[in-house]
Amino acid sequence: MALSVKPALSEPPRPLTGMLPCGDRTFLLAGRPKPTTPSDRPYQQAQAHSRKIAMRPPSSYNDDIEMIYLWIGLGSAIGGAARYWCYGFMARLAGETFPWGTLAVNVLGCWFIGLFATLTGPEGRWLAPSSFRMFVMTGICGGYTTFSTFGLETLNLGRDGQWFKAGANVIGSMLFCLVGVWLGHLLATILNER
């Protein structure tokens, strides 16, 4: 029995256009250009920036990597200082019998990263270079949020026999951090529509 293959498309496939992110690089895809509107300007700027990166010699690319590490380190220092301040503020406000400071830092950090990632992403209101996104999300947010501290404090509560507080810390952190990311995303989605 012979099989016959019929084309599934009634018209020829359209060539791909736009930008394809791949690791540290962004590749431009050839094809028909889409009609331009005033809202396409950030997109066109990102395309031009991607062309410049693709044309750089490898030594220049390595210089960019070194600068990214420098910016991430600076962001981590800023985030760490902000975490220390917020933790101390919450400890003075609510006391230290429960890790309110860590819970507040994690919830605020999750809210902010949800907001920032959505606002500056490919579909966001503000197109940000990947180096700036790494400075904020990997550097500042990475230095600010404290899930490692969360784990240690929960373990210490359990070791002290305070199982209710340990469980409340786990459930509260997970629930409120997920709600924080969702609220940040929701706010950014609303801002993107304006």
Image: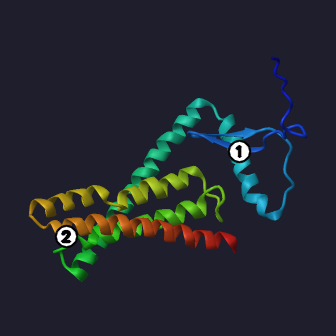
In the rendered image, which residue does mark 1 sit on? 19
Q: What separation in Å lies between label 1 and label 2 (alpha carbons)?
A: 48 Å
The picture places residue 184, in percent across and down from the top left corner, at 51, 69
Left or right, residue 125 beside residue 141: right
Q: Residue at image x 48%, y 58%? A: 136
Spot the residue most to the top. 1
Q: Amino acid at mark 1?
A: Met
Query: Splitting the image into 4 quarters, where does residue 107 fall?
Result: bottom left
The crowd level at tag 1 (other Cα within 10 Å; few <14, some 14-19, many 20+) is some
Spot the residue most to the bottom. 93
Q: Nearer the viewer, mark 1 or mark 2?
A: 2
Taking 177 as reference, is 121 above or below it? above
Location of the N terminus by quadrant is top right
**Camera-nearest residue between 33 and 143:** 33
**Camera-nearest residue between 35 and 53:** 35
Q: Earlier in the sequence, mark 1 or mark 2?
A: 1
The picture places residue 25, in percent across and down from the top left corner, at 61, 39
In the rendered image, which residue does mark 2 sit on? 165
Q: Residue at image x 66%, y 69%? A: 192
Q: Amino acid at mark 2?
A: Lys
Left or right, residue 11 beside residue 119: right
Q: Is residue 85 visible?
A: no
The picture places residue 72, in percent across and down from the top left corner, at 43, 51
Q: Residue at image x 73%, y 47%? A: 48
Query: Splitting the image into 4 quarters, where does residue 169 fall?
Result: bottom left
Left or right, residue 9 beside residue 147: right
Q: Residue at image x 24%, y 57%? A: 151
The crowd level at tag 2 (other Cα within 10 Å; few <14, some 14-19, many 20+) is some
Q: Determine whether the residue tagged by mark 1 lies in a helix, strand or loop.
A: strand
The picture places residue 28, in percent across and down from the top left corner, at 73, 40
What is the total number of numbered labels drawn onto the structure image?
2
